[in-house]
Image: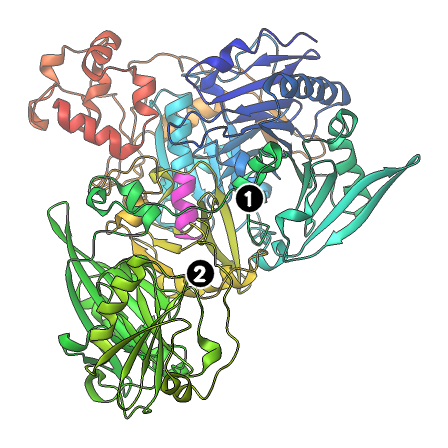
Amino acid sequence: MDISKGLPAIQSHRDLHIWITENQKMVPVPEGAYGNFFEEHCYVVLHVPQSPTATQGASSDLHYWVGKEAGAEAQGAAATFVQRLQEERGALTVLHREAQAHESDCFRSYFRPGIIYRKGGLPSDLKHVETNMFNIQRLLHIRGRKHVSATEVELSWNSFNKGDIFLLDLGKMMIQWNGPKTSISEKARGLALTYSLRDRERGGRAQIGVVDDEVKAPDLMQIMESVLGRRVGSLHAATPNKDISQLQKANIRLYHVYEKGKDLVVLELATPPLTQDLLQEEDFYILDQGGFKIYVWQGRMSSLQERKAAFSRAAGFIQAKGYPTYTNVEVVNDGAESAAFKQLFQIWSEKRSRNRQLGRVDKPTHVKRDVVKLHSQPELAAQLRMVDDGSGKVEVWCMQDLCRQPVDPKLHGKLCAGNCYLVLYTYQRLGRGQYILYLWQGHQATADEIKALNSNAEELDAMYRGALVQEHVTMGSEPPHFLAIFQGQLVVFQERAGHHGREQSAPTTRLFHVQGSDSYSTKTVEVPARASSLNSNDIFLLVTAGVCYLWFGKGCNGDQREMARVAVTVISKKNEETVLEGQEPPHFWEALGGRAPYPSNKRLPEEVPSIQPRLFECSSQMGCLVLAEVVFFSQEDLGPYDVMLLDTWQEIFLWLGGATGAWKEAVAWGQEYLKAHPAGRSLATPIVLVKQGHEPPTFTGWFFTWDPYKWTPDLSHKEVVEGSPGTALPISEIRAEVNSFRLSRWPGNGRAGAMSLQALKGSQDSSGNELMRGPKLGGTSSFLSSTSTSINGALPREQLMHQAAEDLPEGVDPARREFYLSDSDFQDIFGKSKEEFYSMATWRQRQEKKQLGFF
């Protein structure tokens, strides 16, 4: 099969390319039809990263999608196409096998706001998706949380249930029926898909109605019953979700696959925690993620025969394990692994992958801190975990008797392991005050004190009207910015704090470990006063009754020594005596209880993790955390009803949408995520709570672009419902058009079903009786029909731009005045076609209309 005709388009500016099977060959799918999948076909989807921030050598994703009614010929054509396309693309390609309704999060992330499953096949003489087609009558079953899908189902009340959303599409009229058990977020996402369908398939010229309560929407129900008939009996119960919890996904096993004679051997190799060195470049492995997903890893030296057999070997493994045939398969090559695959391992080094190919070993390197650029470069702030240089305002409270007590500024840098502290940091950004509230938890703090810490944080957040970014910090895992605000003078004592933060009576001999080499990494921690606590690479401060020894190990450098002298002034006012390793006076060892062995090996700098950040939507099912990943994420993926988890490996961000009520569960979800992570993550990883509209640069810097003014008022689901059409004026007109359809019967029952594709009489007429685009919000609900005034053709721009609503021509909808422009005027003014404009997010449409005088 010749695939060369499809390849040139891959070199275009677009990052997504789709082909569909047609007569045993693959043909490109027009971009306007992306997201529509016919169940009798197979599709091939290629994603090529185009982002300027993508790492060098970023891998492409090649998906082989199989419809549930696709035949063997279609599957064979698609498989051959995938194989040859993979050869053309090279080793930096991740292969995915997708089955209808069971696609990977990576696949679903391409299609916003959702996927449409269409019945049957695509007739060769018809377009993939017709625009401005009003001769349609179908029922779509809408499901999903972050990744929404809509499936064509029987046009019958029997298709409905209490827990899902259904869209009755009548061409000019689209009615979204929300099951009584659906959540507000599900309703909002269903509505986003409904609007998208209207804009893409009707050019924005269709009326949308929402049934949230059947009793309160009698007119819409009358229209639905004119199509579906009267409902007999009660609705079906909600269908339980079968989402995989994080605990299930944490059950992973690594298998070594090899040939022994004529036999294929699959040998279990390891269970968590997995390490990267288990993967050998000449071998072939299968990683089983609890039957939820199968990964196939191919070493760069594995044979060509093994690579071609990757999918078949995965299929054989799935069959042997008794897993469903739709189990997702991902094939990754040595050096081109996906972020999801890498995070299944305890640690993953990109340098190890590259150096293994080059035959060398490099030493880890530090990321250079250039704090001067933090304000202008959010991406740098995110990488360094620093919102600024730490020079802002600092306030500290210590938890005592379950209440917060202010700490004297002179004692701000002194924390005690037996206590909890609130540290409020205030800084300026974008011309307004920004806040970070650190919740510091000592190792010896009690459960009651930790509970008091959280409740007092809630009180402070309420005082600041929800503007505080809350970062949960465990002793020993302080982030760089927390250290920076104390300017190298942070000292952690082992005892509990006395009244107002003063430490209680202390032992006469104390040993402190000075860690770090600058103000962004230095802290001093009290350790057991014995010789075995020393380390040749570090600096220690020994405080005795009569003298203070500053001990320099042989491996410490000048920067460490400079910061240590700063720490000494915080801990002790006694006479300081500098001691070099190997030149200690007898009293030094006596104070430590005598000589003893201690570590002296040179410690390599900690390597900066090379893990890509990952974004997930959080929800709970039967008390267990369920995550849906958004791959190639952007700010558009954050919605007002969402709780999103951003994992940057060194920190866990929980982003809370402005309309969500789950903020109390968010921190617990972050902790559950760390506990269930298959890589054995540290439970002390800082967890940061971020609210919509108050995002710090350490969060926004992980996004390719970020608009700080994006969160402008937008239509809520409630507003749309209250503004849904409801008067009886046009019902006779709608019912007349419904009755003009010839309804065919579904096999096996006698109820009216899907319509035969016959045009409604006059339905293509864009004037006269056509229902205008968009619901009228506020006040009484009504259909926006143009029966009172017929507008034939376009109107001059002068009559529409910068005009008050009462000055507009009769019959013009003030909220959609731009729609009445001619196509040429629209292109000239907006710089894009109407179709492109209406495919944009609603908030962005409103923003452009305000700027150009159409609002």
Q: Which of marks 2 and 1 precedes in the sequence? A: 1
Disc 1 marks which amino acid? Ala
Q: Which residue is mark 2?
A: 670
Give the numbered dot on residue 340.
1
Residue nearest the viewer, comparing 696 with 730: 696
Residue 457, given in percent of the width and then of the height, sits at 27, 71
Q: Are marks 1 and 2 in contact (CB under 8 Å)?
A: no
Magenta: predominant secondary structure element? helix
User: In which image quadrant can residue 60 be found?
Assistant: top right
Q: Say how many tags the image has.
A: 2
- Tell me if residue 273 comes above or below residue 179 in the rendering: below
Residue at (47, 36) in percent of width and height: 167
Disc 2 marks which amino acid? Gly
Residue 385, given in percent of the width and then of the height, sits at 32, 52
Residues under labels 1 and 2: Cα distance?
A: 18 Å
> What range is drawn magenta here?
183-191
